Structures are given as C-alpha cells and as structure tokens.
Amino acid sequence: MQSLSNLESLTHFVPELALASFAVVVLIADLLARGRGSQMAAALALLSLVVVGAIVAAETHDGELLFMGMVRHDAFSQFLKVLIAVCGATTVVVSWRAPEIDGKMKGEYYTLLLFAIFGMFLMVSAANLVLVYIAVEMASISSYLLAGFVTSRTRSSEAAFKYVIYGSVASGVMLFGISLLFGMAGGADIAGMSSRLVGAPNVGVVLALVLVFAGIGYKIASVPFHMWSPDVYEGSPLPVTAFLSVASKAAGFGLAIRFFYDGWASASASVADWPTFVALVSVLTMTVGNFAAIGQRNLKRLLAYSSIAHGGYLLMGVAAMGGGSSEPIAPMLFYLVVYLFMNLGAFYIVLHLSHPSRLGSETIDGYRGLVRRNPWLAVSMSVFLFSLIGLPPFAGFWGKLYLFKSVIDRSLAPGGIAGHNFTWLVVVGLLNSAVSLYYYFSVVKAMLLDAGEEEGQVRAHPAFAVLLLLLLIPTLLLGFVTTSDDPWVRDASLSAASTSLVP
Amino acid sequence: MDVLTLLWLVPLVAMVVVLVAPRSLARIISLIATAITLVLSGVVWSSFDPSVASIQMETRLAWIPALNIQYFVGVDGISITLILLTTVISIIAVIASWNIGEETHREGTEKGYFAMLLLLVSGMLGFFLALDLILFYLFFELTLLPMYFLIGVWGGPRREYAAIKFFLYTLFGSVFMLVAILALYFQSGAAGARTFSIPELAQAGLPVHVLNWLWLGFFLGFAIKVPIFPFHTWLPDAHVEAPTPISVILAGVLLKMGTYGLVRMNVQVLSGASEGWWTFLAVLGVINIIYGSFCAMAQKDLKKLVAYSSIGHMGFVLLATAARTPEGINGAIFQMVSHGLLSGMLFLVVGVIYVRAHHRYIVYPTETELLDLYHIDRSKAGTMGFGGLANIMPVYTGVMTIAFFGSLGLPGMSGFVGEALALLGAWRVYPVFTVLAVIGIVVGAAYFLWTIQRMFLGAKNPDWAGLPDISTRELVTLVPLAALVIVLGVVPRIAIDLTKETVVGLQAVQDAVARLTSF
C-alpha cells in the first residue's frame, strides 16, 4: 500500500475530476441553452452520473493513498461511490418531471446535485480528518441549497434554514473535535488514530470522540442529532428528500465505518469505550425514530422517522466493530444496498403520487383505497414497506438477518465486542422492527383495506413504472440470489478492513 | 422435482395462476391446487415408512453456502401427520370459501381472497416440511401476511383491529425466535461447521445454560402462536372477525404450527434444557385448559365459545408435550390432529348458522353488549338468540351434535382418544396437574351440552322459524371431517402408527422415560 504524490494521484482521481467537470459543463450548457432545450441539464446530469458510475465501477485499486495520505482509493470507497452514483442517477430520473423542481433553475439544480455527490465521494474515501471536514461541508452545503430549492414555498425555505443551522452547528462541533484529536494525536490521519492517543488524557479523548460523532451523527441522523431530518425531509422537494435519505446516509455510514474501524476499532477500553457509546446511540436512534413515526400522518415525515430508525439498526453494526472486527462491515454494506432499493422505491411512489394529476396527496388519509385506483402502485408500495419492516422473504429481512447475525456472532466470540455482549442490542432491534410494523402497516391498511372517498383510476407514467420495476425486483429477490458474503460485498468490506493495518 | 417440494410449490404456483386468470376461475383453480396437494400428501403417506424413526424423503440443496443455510425438507412421523391434516383442512377451506364474495359482501374480490388462501396453504405446508431453521422461519412468517389480509379484508366489523393484533402478537413472538435461531446457529459449532439444520442441531449437545435461554426464545415464538395463556388474547378477536373458512384454517392448522414448533424445537432440539421449563409449560397447559374452558362457558357468542374452547383443548397438547413420555408426545400429536378436525367442524357449523341468521348469539345479549362490544343497532336486538333449532334444521342439528360430542371427548370419537392419551402421558410425570386438567373436560362437557340445550332444544324462537337447513355444499365440507373424527376415534392407530417410532426416537422422550423408570 503506497502513498502517492499529488501528481501521481490524479490518475486515480478521474471519477471525481470527471464529476466536477461535468457539474460545470451542466451549468454552462444550461446557461447557453436557456429557454430552448429545457431537459438538457437533466440529460447531461444523467449522462455524467452514468459515465462517472461506469468509471468508478471499472476501476482497479490497491488501496493506494492519494494526495499524500488524504484520500483512500480502495474497493470500499468504490462500492459506496457506485451506490451513491446509482442513487444520484435515479434522483435525476425522478426529478425530470417532478413538479417541485422549478423549470427555470434546472441547470443550477443538477449542478448542485453533482456537487453534493462529489462531496459524498470524498466523504467515503477520506483518510484524513481535515478532508473529512471539507467533504462533509461540500456535501452539506450543496444539500442545504437543494433542500431549499423551491424558493416559492415557505416549507422548503424553512427546511433549508433548519438544515443550515443544525448542519453548521454540527460541523462546527465536529471541527472542534477534530482539532482536539489533531492536538492530542499529533496528526489528523484516521488510520491508527487511537494508538497515537495512548497516554492522552481520557477526558479529552472521550470529549473529542463525542464531538466528532456529532458531525457524523448529523449526517446519518442519529439521535440526538436527528432533529433536522423530519422537517427537512418534509420541506424539501421530494427527489431531494429521497436522495438525502439514501445517498447522504450511505456516505455518512461510509465515513462512520472508516472513522471507527480504521481509527478506533482496536482501541482498548482504557482509551475510549466507544462501542458502548455507539450501542446506546443506536438504541436511542431506532427507538426514537420508530416511536416518533407512529404518530405521523404525512408520508414524508413517516418515512423520515423510519429512515432515522434504519440508521439506528445500521449503527448496531458500527458498535459491533469494536474490538477490531471487520465482520459487521459486509452486512452493513449489504443493508445499505437493500435500503437503497426499498427506501427509494417507497419515496418515489410517494413522489409520483403527490403529483396533482394523480393523487395530489402525501398523507396516509389520501392513500385510502389506492388499491382500487391503481393496484400496481399499491402493491409495489406494500412490498417496499414490508421490506422496510424486515418481513421475510423480502430483501429487508435478509439485510437485517445478516446485520443482526454479525452482532450476535461478535458478541458470542471469545472476547466479545471489546469485552461487551451486545446480544441485547439485537433483541432491542428486533422489538423495534415489531414496533415499526405498526406504522408501516397503517399505510398498507389505508391503501389496501380502507375505502377511499374518490374513485377513478390513478395513472402511473410508463417511464416511472419501468423505474419502479427496477427497484422492485431487487427488493423481492436480493436475499434469495445474493448475500452479504458474495464477492462484490465481501471485497469492499475486506478492503475497508485492510486499511487499518496502516500504522 | 421431489414430491415434498411440490407440496408447497403447487399452491404457490396456483396463487400466481389465480392472480392472472379470470376472476370466475379463481375458486376452481384453488380447488384443483388443493386437491393436488391432497393427492401429493397421500403419495407421501403411501411411501412413508412408519417403522423408521428418522427423517425420510429428505432433499438437501445448498442455498446460502457462506452461512450453511440449506434448502432442506423432509418428513418424519410428526410432520407427516400434520401435513395430512393441513391438506385435508385446506381443501375443505376452499370448498367452504366457494361463495366467499357474497358471504362477506365483497363481490369481485375473489381473486385476492383465493390468492391469499393459497399463499397461506403454501406457507403452512412449507413450515411443516422445513428442516433448516432459516427455511422454517421463512415459512413461519410467510403465513402472517396472507392471514393479515384474509382477516383484514374479508373479516367482520372489527376486522382491522383483529388483523393487526394477530400480526403484532405473532411478529413479537417470532422476534425472540429469530434471536434464538441465530444464537443456536452460533452455538452449533466452530466457525465453518455451524449449521441451521434441525436434525444436526438436535445432536449438538449444548450446555444447559445456553439451552435454557434458547428454550425461552423459541417458547415465546410458539406460545403466542398456540396461543398459551397469557398470550392468547389475539385469538378470540381473530376468530370472531375472520370469515368462516379462515377460522377453520386458523384453528385447524395455524395453532398447530405453535405446538408443532414446541415439539420440533423445544422437545427435539432443546431437550437438554432444565426440567423447570417443562413444569412451567405444564402449569401453563393446565391454566390453558381450565381458564379456556371457563371462558368458553361464559360466552354468548357461539364463535367466541368455540375460540375459547380451542384455547382449552390446546392446553392438553401442552400438558402432554411437557410430560415428554411416549404416550404424552403421541397424545399431543393425536390431539393436534383431532383438534384440527374438530375445531374445523365447529367453525364450519358456526359459519352455517351465521350465514343464515347473520348473528351468532346463543342467547339474547344485553343491550350494553350489543352497543359497546358489537356495535349492533339496538333495533335488531329483537331477532337475537336461538332456541328449538332442532325442529327447524334437523340435519344441521345432527352434524353440530357430532362436532360438539367429538369436542367434549365422547368415547368413539377422536377427541376422546386425544385427551385420554394426553392425560395418560402426563399422569406419570405430573399427576397433580393431570387431575386438575380433568376439570377442563368436565367444564367442556358442561358448556357444549348447555349450548346444545339452549340453541337446539326448548322453545322455538319464532324469528328463526324459516331458516333453511344445511346445504349440500356445507355438508360436503362437514361430512369428511366428521368421518375422520369417527374413524380416528374408533381406529386411532391409523395416526399413532405414523408417529410412534419417531416419538420413541426423540432423545427427549428417551431421557424422560429413563428418568421415570429410575424411580
């Protein structure tokens, strides 16, 4: 594993360079074509994401360190970059005809989207806390603007405003934590950070860790840094909401895995007992998310809270990395893939139906009797929701099974998770799944069992039906045909694991 | 393809066919599919060798090799009995569903109904066949979704409440079961040698403290399904709201998934768990018997009465399972089959009267009950309650009497054999509990006879003078069950021969016998 100089690094940095160039091209092309080809920006953005995604997917990697140790170039980041690019591409597709995306500002919208993706790419490949900060800011600032994109709507402005305030505070706090770590460890490299902190004052280490976690927790909407998410999800344009709930979360977890595994996994409990901390945050996150979701009548808010809960399940995996095990990484990555399909599916159906020409509603009440107005959409939505609950045989079940299995496996292994047994965490997680059943089913019940006030067919756009099918097939089959042990996940998780060997 | 795979695959494929075929064909396709599964189960029966205790006709395919998850199905004496029960109950449920659209006032929804019914059948059969724990769990959960919709869409006035209650309770239980399954997997051996295979896990020889909490995990999952007191409260709600054929399946097969699970997992695989658990189970069994019977006696709604009587009768299965003597386990399985047939009959006869009278009150309910509990208009209260039906519907009265007498344990019918075997098996281990359990039989006789007296004898209620007698289609569903009840009551060895060797082969049973004979 070698550390490359700035110039050498550029050849391995092609996707990011391409992405940044494309962002500028989209902006300029839209300016030149303004008033004529109104969909040009979208087409270019889609093209750029397909091209960038293809470049990323085709890359080979030896885990090189780029830019003198700032950026990690490995299968783990490659995996998450593909995930984020896929999510970005579907976001472009659904933004195409979304009523909320103002016709005049298309170029700016897609440019911001590409820059947000650029930031997320950096987040999942950053090997140095300074770059982590820059990457988080890059992704966040673009996201703030995307969230507030519908300037004519108060809710959207309010969402963006909340997002900015919370986000700035969180990243400020994180920067403080980074500077503490930098001071105590004598450097900001993530890999092996805890070993350089042996002997540092324990209070300082714990404080710094909590402060840095504030920044990460904000990105993955973990309790108590989750407050922004329901309001932002509700107020943002729906394509942005879907994008944030999946891509931003994937990037956040990429960062969390990298930070805790590379920097802290092998830390002894005398330096910091972070696995217990993360486990507690995980319990709080899933419980608060699920219980808050029960009372929601607006589907965007409901999905926002449920998405908080899913962050909580994923955090179990982070906690289980304690003691230096890479085993939970593959299940977490698999869960993120499953989550991409099922969550995007649910959000996109909400998006599609919210169009005034279809249902014009985002509330559970508006979904009553949907099965008689469009059985295909109602059944697809039910499948996505069943999968989000984690009911077998849908993909969500397998995602949870592998994740929970890894936590139990680690707990029962000799030495446990840095001396802890987190089997109780799995019980809490499963009980939470039972709770989540209640609110997901309230939607299923409204769609399939309740009688609606209005009759008449709701038509789905043919292109949307195709997109839906592409999301539905993996949601149905992912667990049967592939597992978290398949090479495409295993390689990525092993590559994440191998980096920790760097002193 | 092997016959066991076909057993669960045929209903699943038929479900897809029902969904794409025209609506008018839904019921005939379902009938054909369940008839095929009935024939297939007969084929399995004919090629089953009852003198062999181990798993037969097994199919093993690697499915998820990294975790050693297999597609692993097979039958032994215990599962084949329940598969035969399931295929019989399934085809009867389809026949009973023939006019489901009209009967539930949801004309035009037959496709969805039969599709869900077939999915349910597939899940139940798969559950009894599965010998890999992940497969076992998948099929266990697979029955949940169709049941939710069958109750929630085609049920009575409080159907949604009952459906979600059923779902939440069962899922809550299976959550603990899933943790126990994963833990069992990790305890089953060193990394690389771990397995989800039930026969192999039975040989694993785990330490008692591990077995103890695994036992509790599986117990919680199955206890809710059975249901064992105090997890039983979903059952009366689910039964009262479910349409008749679904009640038949629920009582006839779904409850048996719980007791089968107890025998398969807690007795066979976790037999080394501490003795205290079995006494605990026996106590709960006795509570089920006594509490369920007294609750049944207090009911005015005929369907609730039958539902609570189910809780009581399942108590015998629990008590006998807890004893783990050869007679006990044989009795438990026999009682499962017997109760499956009898409760199927009971719910069918309740359905017959409900379709005609649109209510199920044995006697006049009070005004408060009508308004608060059942949301029924006060003005209709005048047409409630039965009496003297024996003159109005003589054939129906005859069939109902068979079902009632079978259930109260009249010798010559399967209910007697089941209860007698169960008590016989329990006696050697829990004599005190066995004596207490007999109270349940007495109370059972009391409420069944009392119901016959109040509904069929005595003064005629003129409101119901014009009720038509039972129809041929309804008889077609009831007569085979009645015949089986009597045949099994007279020649019980048909069923016992199937299970006998397997039961003797169970490690837990051998341990229990060794323990008893060492006195």
Image (spheres, rainbow, N blue to C red):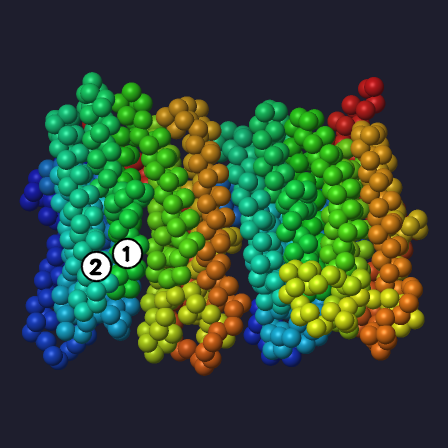
Label 2 near label 1: C-beta < 8 Å? Answer: yes
Is B247 located above or below residue A206 in the figure? below
Numbered disc 1: secondary structure: helix
Q: Which subunit holds the residue at mark 1?
A: A
Q: CA distance from mark 1 to mark 2?
A: 8 Å
Q: Position of residue B247 (x, y in %)?
A: 70, 60
Q: Which subunit holds the residue at mark 2?
A: A
Q: Which mark is residue A231?
A: 1
Residue ID at (15%, 41%):
A172
Residue ID at (29%, 64%):
A238
Numbered disc 2: secondary structure: helix
User: Front-most of A88 and A443?
Assistant: A443
Q: Position of residue A461 (x, y in %)?
A: 35, 76
Residue ID at (63%, 51%):
B234
Total residue callouts: 2
Q: Are marks 1 and 2 on the same chain?
A: yes
* Quarter placement of the N terminus of chain A: top left
Residue underneath mark 2? A158
Q: Position of residue A344 (x, y in %)?
A: 35, 60
Is A54 located above or below residue B382 in the figure? above
Q: Is residue A60 left or right of residue B191?
A: left
Pointer 1 local density, CA inside 10 Å: few below 14, some 14–19, many at least 20: many
Amino acid tagged 1: Asp
Q: Is residue B352 left or right of residue A310?
A: right
Amino acid tagged 2: Glu
Q: Is residue B190 left or right of residue A491?
A: right
Pointer 2 local density, CA inside 10 Å: few below 14, some 14–19, many at least 20: some
Going from N to C along the chain, the mark reached first, 1 or 2, is 2
User: Front-most of B136 and B260?
Assistant: B260
Q: In the picture, residue B18 is in which quadrant? A: bottom right
Decide if residue B168 is in sight here: yes
